[in-house]
Amino acid sequence: MAKTLDLVPVGEWGFFTLPRPMVIAGPCSAETEEQVMETAKGLNEFGIHVFRAGIWKPRTHPGSFEGIGTPGLKWLQKVKKEYGMKVATEVASEKHVFECIKYGVDMVWLGARTTANPFLVQEIAEALRDTDIPVLVKNPVNPDLDLWIGALERLNREGVRKLGVIHRGFSTSQKIAYRNDPQWKIAIELRTRYPDLPFFADPSHMGGSRDYLLELSQRAMDLGLDGLMIESHCNPSAALSDAHQQLTPPALKELLESIVVREKDTDSREYRDGIVQLRAQIDIIDENLLYALNTRMGVSRKIGQYKKEHNIAILQTSRWDSVLEDMKKKGRAYGLSEEFIETVFNAIHEESVRAQNEILES
Ligand code: PEP
Ligand code: MN
């Protein structure tokens, strides 16, 4: 049984103007004073109040741009002063926390690689003790819900009560379209366990490309999440990190206007928790079905190749008849009608035979 968290409601943080989505936006990295100020100006112009910018960047390869470091904190101060925005950055050590406190950073987040490391989380939690700085915890890189919860517990035990999470997807060795695998079921599980925990999605790091931002943001809203953290840069193609996934402020405005956000009053909440969530689950299952179908077709083509090399005919009806009988029997155990199983598997089989014939004739 999960422990409860002692939380200050996000409405009392004084950061976000409700209703959903609460938005945090800004560049992947603070690069220059001009880039920071111009991006913040563009975002402020359409009502974004919380500005993000990475100051210390966890990069895969040494020699990549690893963040501007402490000098960038002065630019964040300037954003606060000129535009009255709240500013947020990623911390990965107690040193980062102390620098943030010194320069008046309003909010910090733990990156995916940091959440995965309890030593660092503990060190950061202790450095934040006696401060009032809200902390958002990204999911760990690996799909481990307990590790994510453990990080929340560590922070909460040191007195961090303005606490929230950011779902940015999980590393995967599978070839998928997105940069990180959303595995929404893990987010849903966390949401169910801690319904009062402010919950953001980060479609930028999840998708890894501007092309996926809208569908992922919409999905996050359909699942009832509270907010979005999205990367925005005044000149994305010149960005020193994550150039493919950043949007200009006007493009972000357009994206946010295209998202359909359902009401959160009592009636629609019931609706959201019911049908909308189920539909989102169906979408995920459909994607899994597609993945399975594609994998099956791959194997089927290999069989075709193999048959060709051994000079064997494509169609062995007796084998297919027995496969179908077996599927019908198994389907019955799941309460799936024979007719349905026959329709689905005959369609799959037909496509396999077609693909194998192609190979034979090639
Ligand atoms: C970031 O937000 O810039 C970042 C590095 O994200 P993540 O920890 O999700 O990779
Ligand atoms: Mn980034």
Image (cartoon, rainbow, N blue to C red):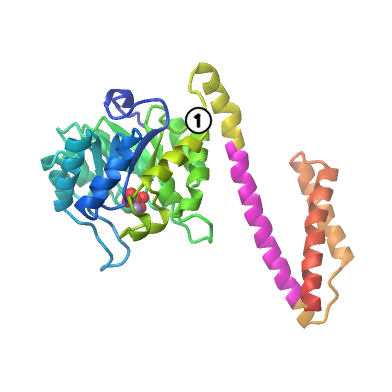
Coordinates of residue 80 in the picture (x, y in percent): 19, 37
Counting the numbered discs, the total is 1
Q: Which residue is mark 1?
A: 261
Coordinates of residue 45 in the picture (x, y in percent): 32, 36
Question: Is residue 164 or residue 27 the one in the foreground?
Answer: 27
- What secondary structure prevails in the magenta region? helix
In the rendered image, which quarter is residue 355 located in? bottom right
Q: Quadrant of the C terminus?
A: bottom right
Classify 255 as above or below 21.
Answer: below
Which residues are the magenta region? 280-305
From the viewer's perspective, is 317 left or right of 294?
A: right
Q: Residues within 10 Å of mark 1 (few under 14, many from 20)?
A: some
Classify 108 as above or below 16.
Answer: below
- Tell me: is circle 1 under 8 Å from ligand 1: no
Is residue 105 visible in the rendered image? The answer is yes
Query: For numbered disc 1, what is the local secondary structure?
Result: loop
Q: Is residue 59 magenta?
A: no
Q: Quadrant of the N terminus?
A: top left
From the viewer's perspective, is 288 left or right of 242?
A: right
Residue at image location 51% in from the left, 39% down from the top: 218
Residue at image location 46% in from the left, 56% down from the top: 179
Residue at image location 81% in from the left, 66% down from the top: 354
In the rendered image, which quarter is residue 251 located in? top left
